[in-house]
Amino acid sequence: MNSENSQQMGEMELAHLCEKLHAALHYERIDEAEKTARKLLEIAPRSTTSWELWGDVLLAQGKAEEAADAFRKAVELEPANADAERKYARIQLDLQQAKWQRQVLESGDLAQFRGVADREPATAAARSALFPGLGQVYNGEYEKGLVMFFVGMALLIGAVRLLVTWLSPGQSLSGLGAVFGYIGLLGGIALYVFGIYDAYRGGQREQDHPLVPPPTELQDREE
């Protein structure tokens, strides 16, 4: 058997192992995938594909830091490997995010977790349209939302009393009661409109300032 035939057989074996590994990962047969990946690394330790697939296996096992090392090795062997570079960058970002979240939890400054979920400005505005303060609570502005809610309740009571008086000719309000009624009606309308606008703007601010700080900010915190 000449060297060319041996090389072709080697390439066929590598292709077969790669297909087998992809199938094992697809069907979540992690143990089988690990054995295949180890064999692939043994046969082709200088192959960027071997290290990239080994990183995929480690990531499936929840070993993020080891997977990052494998993807880094794949990029070092072939800088033009866009897939490995993308995976390496993504996992580095995830690791930095996890580290930052851990630091925030340890510091007790839970206010930094406002905006953990993806908040839609339109959804925040719609909640405030139901009642003032609900959109602010949705945006994570709990103190403001509670204040607006209770102020809205107080204004609603005054407005309802005034409206009942208007609809019932036999009833009347005293001078002070009428003042509170008009304050409740006009103040309630103003609070309602402001609550919708403020909730929408708050939702936009949450989108502009997501949970994960920029990479430069993360580096500054580590230093």
Image (spheres, grey):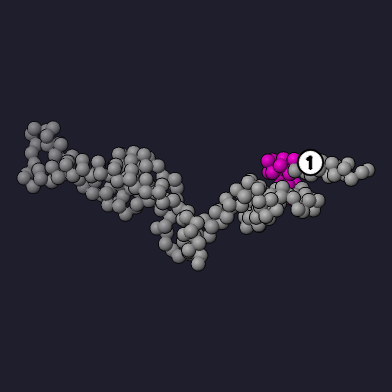
User: Is 114 on the left or on the right of 49, as rendered?
Assistant: left
Q: Is residue 129 left or right of residue 82?
A: left
As drawn, is 90 to the left or to the right of 117? Answer: right
10 and 172: which one is in front? 10
Residue furthest out toward the right: 1
Residue drawn at x 37%, y 51% as measured from the top left? 140
Q: Which residue is mark 1?
A: 16
Whether residue 31 is visible: no
- Span colored in magenta: 19-35
Q: Within the magenta stretch, is there residue 113? A: no
Q: Look at the picture and state if 43 lies above or below 162.
A: below
Q: Position of residue 71 (x, y in %)?
A: 65, 53
Residue 35 place in picture, x, y as percent:
77, 50
Q: Residue 157 at what x, y percent from top left?
A: 19, 44
The majority secondary structure of the magenta stretch comes to helix
- Pick whichever, 138 or 67, lies toward us: 67
Q: In the figure, is residue 121 to the left or right of 187? A: right
Identify the residue shown where x is 14% and y is 45%: 183
**What residue is at 40 percent from the left and 42 percent from the top?**
120
Mark 1 crowd level (few <14, some 14–19, many ≥20, 10 Å Cα) = few
Is 29 in the magenta? yes
Element type at mark 1: helix
Q: Is residue 168 above or below residue 208?
A: above
